[in-house]
Image (cartoon, grey):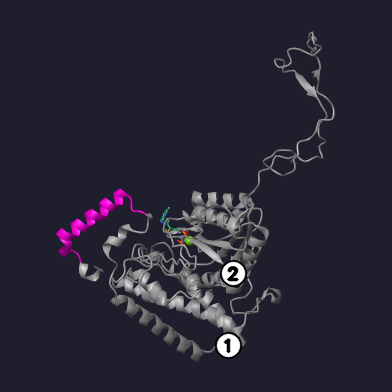
Amino acid sequence: APRRLTTPLVWRPLPGAEAPPLGKDGTQRGISCCPRLLPRQEFPSPEEKPQFPGASADFADRLEFIQPNVISGIPIYWVMDWQGHIVSPDEDPQLPKELVLKLYKTMTLLNTMDRILYESQRQGCISFCMTNYGEEGMHVGSALSPILAVCALTPLPPGVLMYWGYPLDLFMAQCYGNTSDPGKGRQMPVHYGCHDRHFVTISSLLATQIPQAVGATYAIKRSDANRVVICYFGEGTASEGDTHAGFNFATTLECPIVFFCRNNGYAISTPTSEQYRGDGIAARGPGYGLMSIRVDGNNIFAVYNATKEARHRAVAENQPFLIEAMTYRISHHSTSDDSSVYRSVDEVNYWDKQDHPISRLRHYMLNWGWWDKEEEKGWRKSSRKMVMEAFEQVERKLKPNPKLLFSDVYREMPPHLQRQRAALEQHLQHYGKHYPLEHFEQ
Ligand SMILES: Cc1ncc(C[n+]2csc(CCOP(=O)(O)OP(=O)(O)O)c2C)c(N)n1
Ligand SMILES: [Mg+2]
Protein backbone atom coordinates (compact mmCIF):
# COMPACT_ATOMS: atom_id res chain seq x y z
CA ALA A 1 0.00 0.00 0.00
CA PRO A 2 1.28 3.53 -0.69
CA ARG A 3 2.83 5.20 2.32
CA ARG A 4 0.68 7.97 3.90
CA LEU A 5 2.34 11.32 4.46
CA THR A 6 1.99 12.35 8.07
CA THR A 7 2.80 16.08 7.63
CA PRO A 8 1.63 18.48 4.91
CA LEU A 9 4.11 19.51 2.23
CA VAL A 10 6.07 22.60 3.23
CA TRP A 11 8.78 24.01 0.99
CA ARG A 12 12.13 24.77 2.41
CA PRO A 13 15.15 26.24 0.68
CA LEU A 14 18.34 24.32 0.15
CA PRO A 15 21.21 25.65 2.28
CA GLY A 16 22.44 28.94 0.80
CA ALA A 17 19.29 29.60 -1.22
CA GLU A 18 16.56 32.05 -0.46
CA ALA A 19 12.93 31.06 -0.36
CA PRO A 20 10.80 32.68 -3.10
CA PRO A 21 8.41 35.35 -1.91
CA LEU A 22 4.94 34.41 -0.74
CA GLY A 23 2.12 35.07 -3.22
CA LYS A 24 -1.11 36.91 -2.48
CA ASP A 25 -2.80 33.74 -1.45
CA GLY A 26 -0.04 33.00 1.04
CA THR A 27 1.57 30.19 -0.94
CA GLN A 28 5.11 30.22 -2.29
CA ARG A 29 5.55 31.01 -5.96
CA GLY A 30 7.97 29.85 -8.54
CA ILE A 31 8.21 26.44 -6.92
CA SER A 32 7.98 24.49 -10.16
CA CYS A 33 10.82 26.38 -11.79
CA CYS A 34 13.07 26.34 -8.75
CA PRO A 35 15.09 23.09 -8.76
CA ARG A 36 16.92 23.99 -5.61
CA LEU A 37 13.83 23.57 -3.44
CA LEU A 38 12.92 20.19 -1.97
CA PRO A 39 9.65 19.19 -0.36
CA ARG A 40 9.85 18.74 3.38
CA GLN A 41 8.12 15.57 4.33
CA GLU A 42 8.53 12.63 6.55
CA PHE A 43 10.87 10.19 4.79
CA PRO A 44 10.75 6.47 5.29
CA SER A 45 13.33 5.07 7.65
CA PRO A 46 16.19 3.11 6.02
CA GLU A 47 14.83 -0.07 7.59
CA GLU A 48 11.58 0.13 5.65
CA LYS A 49 11.16 -1.91 2.48
CA PRO A 50 11.27 -0.19 -0.92
CA GLN A 51 7.85 0.64 -2.34
CA PHE A 52 8.45 -0.04 -6.07
CA PRO A 53 5.36 -1.74 -7.45
CA GLY A 54 7.44 -3.97 -9.77
CA ALA A 55 9.54 -5.79 -7.16
CA SER A 56 9.33 -7.08 -3.65
CA ALA A 57 12.85 -6.76 -2.29
CA ASP A 58 15.18 -4.94 0.07
CA PHE A 59 17.69 -2.22 -0.77
CA ALA A 60 21.32 -3.27 -1.20
CA ASP A 61 24.09 -0.98 0.04
CA ARG A 62 26.80 -2.49 -2.15
CA LEU A 63 27.13 -2.52 -5.92
CA GLU A 64 26.97 -6.15 -6.81
CA PHE A 65 25.76 -7.92 -9.92
CA ILE A 66 24.03 -11.23 -9.44
CA GLN A 67 26.31 -14.02 -10.59
CA PRO A 68 24.45 -16.69 -12.49
CA ASN A 69 26.83 -19.41 -11.36
CA VAL A 70 26.91 -18.83 -7.59
CA ILE A 71 25.22 -22.13 -6.88
CA SER A 72 26.37 -25.43 -8.28
CA GLY A 73 23.06 -26.12 -10.01
CA ILE A 74 19.50 -27.01 -9.16
CA PRO A 75 19.67 -30.55 -7.75
CA ILE A 76 18.19 -33.46 -9.67
CA TYR A 77 15.53 -35.29 -7.69
CA TRP A 78 15.89 -39.04 -7.93
CA VAL A 79 14.38 -41.99 -6.12
CA MET A 80 16.23 -45.02 -7.44
CA ASP A 81 19.90 -45.56 -8.26
CA TRP A 82 21.33 -47.22 -11.36
CA GLN A 83 21.01 -50.71 -9.91
CA GLY A 84 17.33 -50.23 -9.13
CA HIS A 85 17.80 -49.61 -5.40
CA ILE A 86 15.58 -47.03 -3.70
CA VAL A 87 17.88 -44.30 -2.36
CA SER A 88 15.41 -42.77 0.08
CA PRO A 89 12.67 -45.01 1.50
CA ASP A 90 10.48 -41.97 2.26
CA GLU A 91 10.34 -41.19 -1.45
CA ASP A 92 9.48 -44.72 -2.57
CA PRO A 93 6.01 -44.57 -4.16
CA GLN A 94 5.67 -48.31 -3.37
CA LEU A 95 3.77 -49.06 -6.55
CA PRO A 96 2.25 -52.54 -6.64
CA LYS A 97 3.83 -55.27 -8.74
CA GLU A 98 1.09 -55.28 -11.43
CA LEU A 99 1.51 -51.57 -11.99
CA VAL A 100 5.30 -51.77 -12.18
CA LEU A 101 5.00 -54.57 -14.74
CA LYS A 102 2.59 -52.46 -16.76
CA LEU A 103 5.06 -49.56 -16.71
CA TYR A 104 7.86 -51.80 -17.83
CA LYS A 105 5.81 -53.38 -20.57
CA THR A 106 4.69 -49.99 -21.88
CA MET A 107 8.25 -48.69 -22.01
CA THR A 108 9.54 -51.75 -23.83
CA LEU A 109 6.55 -51.90 -26.18
CA LEU A 110 7.19 -48.29 -27.15
CA ASN A 111 10.79 -49.23 -27.79
CA THR A 112 9.77 -52.13 -30.01
CA MET A 113 7.22 -50.07 -31.94
CA ASP A 114 9.88 -47.41 -32.51
CA ARG A 115 12.26 -49.99 -33.96
CA ILE A 116 9.69 -51.32 -36.41
CA LEU A 117 8.61 -47.84 -37.49
CA TYR A 118 12.20 -46.77 -37.93
CA GLU A 119 12.89 -49.79 -40.13
CA SER A 120 9.70 -49.04 -42.12
CA GLN A 121 10.99 -45.57 -42.85
CA ARG A 122 14.36 -46.91 -43.93
CA GLN A 123 12.56 -49.25 -46.33
CA GLY A 124 10.61 -46.32 -47.79
CA CYS A 125 7.19 -47.36 -46.42
CA ILE A 126 6.70 -44.16 -44.43
CA SER A 127 8.15 -40.72 -45.08
CA PHE A 128 9.52 -39.83 -41.67
CA CYS A 129 10.03 -41.19 -38.18
CA MET A 130 11.22 -40.11 -34.75
CA THR A 131 12.08 -42.57 -32.01
CA ASN A 132 12.16 -42.19 -28.25
CA TYR A 133 15.13 -44.30 -27.14
CA GLY A 134 16.31 -43.33 -23.69
CA GLU A 135 13.28 -41.15 -23.00
CA GLU A 136 10.73 -43.87 -22.29
CA GLY A 137 10.87 -43.33 -18.51
CA MET A 138 9.68 -39.77 -18.57
CA HIS A 139 6.82 -40.53 -20.96
CA VAL A 140 5.40 -43.36 -18.93
CA GLY A 141 6.25 -41.92 -15.50
CA SER A 142 4.41 -38.71 -16.28
CA ALA A 143 1.37 -40.55 -17.69
CA LEU A 144 0.93 -42.59 -14.58
CA SER A 145 -0.48 -40.03 -12.20
CA PRO A 146 -4.24 -39.56 -12.44
CA ILE A 147 -4.22 -36.66 -14.83
CA LEU A 148 -7.47 -35.65 -16.44
CA ALA A 149 -5.36 -33.99 -19.00
CA VAL A 150 -5.58 -32.00 -22.10
CA CYS A 151 -2.06 -32.37 -23.45
CA ALA A 152 -0.53 -29.79 -25.66
CA LEU A 153 2.61 -31.20 -27.07
CA THR A 154 5.58 -30.07 -28.96
CA PRO A 155 8.21 -32.83 -29.02
CA LEU A 156 6.23 -35.99 -28.83
CA PRO A 157 5.58 -38.22 -25.83
CA PRO A 158 3.80 -41.22 -27.45
CA GLY A 159 4.53 -43.30 -24.33
CA VAL A 160 1.83 -41.25 -22.57
CA LEU A 161 -0.76 -42.34 -25.10
CA MET A 162 0.52 -45.89 -25.06
CA TYR A 163 0.20 -46.07 -21.29
CA TRP A 164 -3.36 -44.78 -21.59
CA GLY A 165 -4.14 -47.76 -23.86
CA TYR A 166 -4.04 -46.16 -27.30
CA PRO A 167 -4.00 -49.15 -29.66
CA LEU A 168 -0.92 -50.11 -31.64
CA ASP A 169 -2.78 -50.22 -34.95
CA LEU A 170 -3.83 -46.57 -34.53
CA PHE A 171 -0.24 -45.51 -33.87
CA MET A 172 0.77 -47.33 -37.02
CA ALA A 173 -2.22 -46.06 -39.02
CA GLN A 174 -1.16 -42.51 -38.17
CA CYS A 175 2.37 -43.14 -39.45
CA TYR A 176 1.06 -44.75 -42.62
CA GLY A 177 -1.62 -42.06 -43.04
CA ASN A 178 -4.25 -44.60 -44.05
CA THR A 179 -8.05 -44.68 -43.77
CA SER A 180 -7.90 -45.76 -40.11
CA ASP A 181 -5.85 -42.71 -39.16
CA PRO A 182 -8.08 -40.34 -37.14
CA GLY A 183 -6.10 -37.47 -38.70
CA LYS A 184 -6.95 -38.77 -42.20
CA GLY A 185 -3.34 -38.75 -43.29
CA ARG A 186 -2.96 -35.00 -43.01
CA GLN A 187 -0.13 -34.95 -40.49
CA MET A 188 3.48 -36.00 -40.70
CA PRO A 189 4.12 -39.48 -39.29
CA VAL A 190 4.48 -39.75 -35.47
CA HIS A 191 2.35 -36.63 -34.92
CA TYR A 192 -0.28 -38.47 -32.94
CA GLY A 193 -3.45 -37.01 -31.46
CA CYS A 194 -6.46 -38.45 -29.70
CA HIS A 195 -9.64 -36.48 -29.30
CA ASP A 196 -11.28 -38.83 -26.79
CA ARG A 197 -8.33 -38.67 -24.47
CA HIS A 198 -7.86 -34.92 -24.83
CA PHE A 199 -4.43 -35.46 -26.34
CA VAL A 200 -3.97 -32.51 -28.66
CA THR A 201 -2.34 -33.50 -31.94
CA ILE A 202 1.39 -33.02 -31.78
CA SER A 203 2.59 -29.95 -33.58
CA SER A 204 5.96 -29.76 -35.30
CA LEU A 205 6.11 -26.02 -34.90
CA LEU A 206 8.09 -25.65 -31.73
CA ALA A 207 6.39 -23.95 -28.81
CA THR A 208 3.34 -22.74 -30.70
CA GLN A 209 1.14 -24.88 -28.49
CA ILE A 210 2.54 -23.58 -25.22
CA PRO A 211 0.45 -20.37 -25.13
CA GLN A 212 -2.48 -22.40 -26.49
CA ALA A 213 -2.09 -24.89 -23.64
CA VAL A 214 -2.18 -22.03 -21.17
CA GLY A 215 -5.26 -20.60 -22.87
CA ALA A 216 -6.94 -24.01 -22.70
CA THR A 217 -6.05 -24.26 -19.01
CA TYR A 218 -7.51 -20.86 -18.34
CA ALA A 219 -10.77 -21.89 -20.04
CA ILE A 220 -10.83 -25.17 -18.10
CA LYS A 221 -10.17 -23.39 -14.85
CA ARG A 222 -13.17 -21.15 -15.44
CA SER A 223 -15.45 -24.06 -16.26
CA ASP A 224 -14.25 -27.07 -14.31
CA ALA A 225 -12.08 -26.72 -11.25
CA ASN A 226 -10.71 -30.25 -11.11
CA ARG A 227 -8.81 -30.56 -14.34
CA VAL A 228 -5.24 -29.86 -15.19
CA VAL A 229 -3.30 -29.55 -18.42
CA ILE A 230 0.13 -31.06 -18.92
CA CYS A 231 2.23 -29.50 -21.64
CA TYR A 232 5.32 -31.30 -22.96
CA PHE A 233 8.18 -29.59 -24.72
CA GLY A 234 11.95 -29.88 -25.15
CA GLU A 235 14.76 -27.74 -23.77
CA GLY A 236 15.43 -26.41 -27.28
CA THR A 237 11.78 -25.40 -27.57
CA ALA A 238 12.21 -23.42 -24.36
CA SER A 239 14.38 -20.97 -26.33
CA GLU A 240 11.33 -19.85 -28.33
CA GLY A 241 9.52 -16.65 -27.35
CA ASP A 242 6.22 -18.51 -27.11
CA THR A 243 7.57 -20.40 -24.11
CA HIS A 244 8.17 -17.11 -22.32
CA ALA A 245 4.67 -15.92 -23.17
CA GLY A 246 3.18 -19.19 -21.96
CA PHE A 247 5.06 -19.19 -18.64
CA ASN A 248 4.18 -15.59 -17.96
CA PHE A 249 0.49 -15.94 -18.76
CA ALA A 250 0.28 -19.14 -16.72
CA THR A 251 1.59 -17.51 -13.56
CA THR A 252 -0.24 -14.20 -13.90
CA LEU A 253 -3.55 -15.90 -14.74
CA GLU A 254 -2.95 -18.56 -12.04
CA CYS A 255 -3.52 -21.49 -14.38
CA PRO A 256 -3.39 -25.10 -13.16
CA ILE A 257 -0.94 -26.33 -15.79
CA VAL A 258 2.10 -28.59 -15.50
CA PHE A 259 4.88 -27.60 -17.89
CA PHE A 260 6.88 -30.72 -18.54
CA CYS A 261 10.23 -29.96 -20.13
CA ARG A 262 12.21 -32.89 -21.44
CA ASN A 263 15.84 -31.87 -21.36
CA ASN A 264 17.57 -34.48 -23.50
CA GLY A 265 20.80 -32.58 -24.11
CA TYR A 266 20.19 -31.68 -27.76
CA ALA A 267 17.91 -29.66 -29.99
CA ILE A 268 18.54 -31.72 -33.13
CA SER A 269 22.31 -31.09 -33.45
CA THR A 270 22.58 -28.13 -31.07
CA PRO A 271 23.91 -29.22 -27.67
CA THR A 272 22.56 -27.55 -24.53
CA SER A 273 25.91 -25.76 -24.09
CA GLU A 274 25.05 -23.74 -27.21
CA GLN A 275 21.36 -23.45 -26.39
CA TYR A 276 21.62 -21.64 -23.06
CA ARG A 277 24.13 -20.33 -20.51
CA GLY A 278 21.94 -20.50 -17.40
CA ASP A 279 21.21 -23.51 -15.23
CA GLY A 280 18.88 -25.31 -17.62
CA ILE A 281 15.16 -24.72 -17.79
CA ALA A 282 14.21 -25.27 -14.13
CA ALA A 283 16.29 -22.22 -13.17
CA ARG A 284 14.04 -20.03 -15.31
CA GLY A 285 10.93 -21.03 -13.37
CA PRO A 286 11.42 -18.79 -10.31
CA GLY A 287 12.00 -15.85 -12.67
CA TYR A 288 8.39 -16.26 -13.77
CA GLY A 289 7.09 -17.07 -10.31
CA LEU A 290 6.70 -20.73 -11.29
CA MET A 291 6.95 -23.60 -8.81
CA SER A 292 9.83 -25.59 -10.30
CA ILE A 293 11.69 -28.85 -9.88
CA ARG A 294 14.39 -30.73 -11.76
CA VAL A 295 14.09 -34.50 -11.83
CA ASP A 296 16.03 -37.45 -13.15
CA GLY A 297 13.95 -38.31 -16.22
CA ASN A 298 15.51 -41.77 -16.45
CA ASN A 299 14.12 -42.52 -13.02
CA ILE A 300 10.52 -43.44 -13.54
CA PHE A 301 9.56 -43.16 -9.86
CA ALA A 302 11.04 -39.66 -9.59
CA VAL A 303 9.05 -38.56 -12.64
CA TYR A 304 5.94 -40.18 -11.23
CA ASN A 305 6.28 -38.52 -7.80
CA ALA A 306 6.97 -35.09 -9.26
CA THR A 307 4.12 -35.21 -11.78
CA LYS A 308 1.65 -36.54 -9.24
CA GLU A 309 2.50 -33.83 -6.72
CA ALA A 310 2.48 -31.08 -9.36
CA ARG A 311 -0.83 -32.31 -10.75
CA HIS A 312 -2.41 -32.36 -7.31
CA ARG A 313 -1.09 -28.99 -6.20
CA ALA A 314 -1.73 -27.24 -9.52
CA VAL A 315 -5.46 -27.76 -9.03
CA ALA A 316 -5.54 -27.36 -5.25
CA GLU A 317 -3.57 -24.12 -5.35
CA ASN A 318 -4.56 -22.85 -8.79
CA GLN A 319 -1.02 -22.32 -9.92
CA PRO A 320 1.32 -23.61 -12.62
CA PHE A 321 4.26 -25.96 -12.08
CA LEU A 322 7.42 -26.58 -14.08
CA ILE A 323 9.14 -29.97 -14.18
CA GLU A 324 12.47 -30.27 -15.96
CA ALA A 325 13.13 -33.95 -16.63
CA MET A 326 16.79 -34.63 -17.39
CA THR A 327 17.43 -37.39 -19.89
CA TYR A 328 19.43 -38.17 -23.01
CA ARG A 329 18.30 -38.65 -26.59
CA ILE A 330 19.97 -41.90 -27.61
CA SER A 331 18.50 -41.98 -31.12
CA HIS A 332 19.14 -39.63 -33.98
CA HIS A 333 16.75 -36.70 -33.75
CA SER A 334 14.70 -38.11 -36.60
CA THR A 335 15.22 -40.05 -39.80
CA SER A 336 16.36 -36.74 -41.33
CA ASP A 337 19.30 -36.53 -38.92
CA ASP A 338 22.66 -38.27 -38.54
CA SER A 339 23.88 -37.65 -35.02
CA SER A 340 27.26 -39.32 -35.59
CA VAL A 341 28.31 -36.02 -37.20
CA TYR A 342 28.01 -34.01 -33.98
CA ARG A 343 28.48 -36.42 -31.05
CA SER A 344 30.67 -39.36 -30.16
CA VAL A 345 29.70 -43.01 -30.09
CA ASP A 346 31.14 -43.25 -26.55
CA GLU A 347 28.79 -40.55 -25.33
CA VAL A 348 25.76 -42.34 -26.77
CA ASN A 349 26.94 -45.71 -25.47
CA TYR A 350 27.22 -44.39 -21.93
CA TRP A 351 23.51 -43.56 -21.83
CA ASP A 352 22.48 -46.65 -23.69
CA LYS A 353 24.43 -49.05 -21.48
CA GLN A 354 24.87 -47.32 -18.11
CA ASP A 355 21.91 -45.07 -17.51
CA HIS A 356 18.85 -46.23 -19.37
CA PRO A 357 15.34 -45.86 -17.88
CA ILE A 358 14.30 -49.32 -19.06
CA SER A 359 17.29 -51.16 -17.57
CA ARG A 360 16.91 -49.22 -14.34
CA LEU A 361 13.32 -50.36 -13.89
CA ARG A 362 14.29 -53.88 -14.94
CA HIS A 363 16.93 -53.94 -12.18
CA TYR A 364 14.27 -52.86 -9.70
CA MET A 365 11.94 -55.67 -10.82
CA LEU A 366 14.74 -58.23 -10.71
CA ASN A 367 15.68 -57.09 -7.18
CA TRP A 368 12.13 -57.74 -6.06
CA GLY A 369 11.97 -61.10 -7.84
CA TRP A 370 9.12 -59.84 -10.05
CA TRP A 371 10.88 -60.60 -13.33
CA ASP A 372 13.48 -62.96 -14.72
CA LYS A 373 15.40 -63.66 -17.90
CA GLU A 374 12.82 -66.09 -19.23
CA GLU A 375 9.99 -63.60 -18.77
CA GLU A 376 12.10 -60.96 -20.47
CA LYS A 377 12.71 -63.22 -23.45
CA GLY A 378 9.05 -64.20 -23.68
CA TRP A 379 7.83 -60.61 -23.46
CA ARG A 380 10.31 -59.38 -26.08
CA LYS A 381 9.03 -62.05 -28.45
CA SER A 382 5.32 -61.53 -27.80
CA SER A 383 5.54 -57.73 -27.89
CA ARG A 384 7.34 -57.84 -31.23
CA LYS A 385 4.61 -60.14 -32.53
CA MET A 386 1.92 -57.69 -31.39
CA VAL A 387 3.65 -54.82 -33.17
CA MET A 388 4.18 -56.85 -36.34
CA GLU A 389 0.52 -57.87 -36.44
CA ALA A 390 -0.59 -54.24 -36.15
CA PHE A 391 1.96 -53.32 -38.80
CA GLU A 392 0.68 -55.92 -41.25
CA GLN A 393 -2.89 -54.70 -40.79
CA VAL A 394 -2.11 -51.08 -41.55
CA GLU A 395 0.13 -51.83 -44.48
CA ARG A 396 -2.76 -53.29 -46.45
CA LYS A 397 -5.13 -50.38 -45.98
CA LEU A 398 -5.85 -47.64 -48.52
CA LYS A 399 -4.93 -44.01 -48.05
CA PRO A 400 -7.77 -41.52 -47.50
CA ASN A 401 -9.43 -39.79 -50.43
CA PRO A 402 -7.23 -36.80 -51.45
CA LYS A 403 -10.31 -34.55 -51.28
CA LEU A 404 -10.17 -34.85 -47.47
CA LEU A 405 -7.09 -32.69 -47.55
CA PHE A 406 -9.39 -29.68 -47.41
CA SER A 407 -11.95 -30.67 -44.80
CA ASP A 408 -12.12 -30.33 -41.00
CA VAL A 409 -10.29 -27.05 -40.72
CA TYR A 410 -13.34 -24.78 -40.90
CA ARG A 411 -16.90 -25.72 -40.02
CA GLU A 412 -17.96 -24.37 -43.41
CA MET A 413 -15.38 -24.54 -46.13
CA PRO A 414 -14.38 -21.01 -47.22
CA PRO A 415 -14.44 -20.15 -50.96
CA HIS A 416 -10.66 -20.23 -51.40
CA LEU A 417 -10.49 -23.84 -50.12
CA GLN A 418 -13.47 -24.80 -52.28
CA ARG A 419 -11.59 -23.43 -55.29
CA GLN A 420 -8.43 -25.33 -54.37
CA ARG A 421 -10.36 -28.57 -53.89
CA ALA A 422 -12.04 -28.15 -57.30
CA ALA A 423 -8.64 -27.48 -58.87
CA LEU A 424 -7.21 -30.66 -57.33
CA GLU A 425 -10.15 -32.72 -58.62
CA GLN A 426 -9.72 -31.29 -62.08
CA HIS A 427 -5.98 -31.93 -61.98
CA LEU A 428 -6.51 -35.55 -60.97
CA GLN A 429 -9.07 -36.04 -63.74
CA HIS A 430 -6.48 -34.97 -66.30
CA TYR A 431 -3.29 -36.33 -64.81
CA GLY A 432 -4.53 -39.02 -62.40
CA LYS A 433 -2.72 -41.74 -64.34
CA HIS A 434 0.59 -40.27 -63.21
CA TYR A 435 -0.31 -40.77 -59.54
CA PRO A 436 -0.66 -44.01 -57.55
CA LEU A 437 -4.41 -43.41 -57.11
CA GLU A 438 -5.08 -47.11 -56.74
CA HIS A 439 -3.68 -46.79 -53.20
CA PHE A 440 -6.22 -44.09 -52.31
CA GLU A 441 -9.84 -44.40 -51.33
CA GLN A 442 -12.16 -43.14 -54.09
C1 LIG B 1 9.40 -22.86 -34.93
C2 LIG B 1 10.32 -23.99 -35.34
N1 LIG B 1 11.63 -23.75 -35.52
C3 LIG B 1 12.47 -24.75 -35.87
C4 LIG B 1 11.99 -26.01 -36.06
C5 LIG B 1 12.94 -27.15 -36.48
N2 LIG B 1 13.13 -28.06 -35.33
C6 LIG B 1 12.42 -29.20 -35.22
S1 LIG B 1 12.81 -30.04 -33.81
C7 LIG B 1 13.95 -28.88 -33.36
C8 LIG B 1 14.73 -29.02 -32.10
C9 LIG B 1 13.88 -28.94 -30.88
O1 LIG B 1 14.67 -29.14 -29.75
P1 LIG B 1 14.07 -29.73 -28.45
O2 LIG B 1 12.92 -28.91 -28.02
O3 LIG B 1 15.17 -29.89 -27.48
O4 LIG B 1 13.49 -31.13 -28.91
P2 LIG B 1 14.35 -32.44 -29.31
O5 LIG B 1 15.24 -32.10 -30.44
O6 LIG B 1 15.14 -32.81 -28.12
O7 LIG B 1 13.31 -33.43 -29.66
C10 LIG B 1 14.03 -27.85 -34.30
C11 LIG B 1 14.92 -26.71 -34.21
C12 LIG B 1 10.60 -26.21 -35.88
N3 LIG B 1 10.06 -27.43 -36.01
N4 LIG B 1 9.79 -25.20 -35.50
MG1 LIG C 1 16.09 -31.57 -26.76
Q: Residue furthest right?
A: 7
Tell me residue 143's x, y (percent).
54, 70
**129 lies above or below 255:** below
From the image, tell me which residue sits under label 2: 303
Residue 47 highlighted magenta (yes or no): no
Task: Identify which residue is drawn at 42% across, 55% down.
Answer: 205
Q: Which residues are magenta?
A: 412-435
Dot 1: few (<14), some (14–19), or many (≥20) neighbours within 10 Å? some
| Mark positioned earlier in the residue sequence (1 or 2) | 2
Work out how far the residue at label 1 is from the one at label 2, CA to CA, in angstroms.
21 Å
Task: Identify which residue is drawn at 72% across, 44% down.
Answer: 57
Task: Identify which residue is drawn at 80% across, 19% down.
Answer: 11
Is residue 363 among what the camera can see?
no
Tell me residue 324's x, y (percent).
57, 62
Tell me residue 99's x, y (percent).
58, 81
Residue situated in front as seen by the camera: 17 or 136: 136
Tell me residue 28's x, y (percent).
78, 13
409 vs 398, left or right, is: right
Name the element at disc 2: helix
**273 lies above or below 384:** above
The amino acid pointed to by label 1 is Trp
Residue 424 highlighted magenta (yes or no): yes
State the image quarter where residue 334 is shown.
Answer: bottom left
The amino acid pointed to by label 2 is Val
Q: Quadrant of the N terminus?
A: top right
- Label 2 CB, ligand 2: below 8 Å? no
From the image, tell me which residue sits under label 1: 370
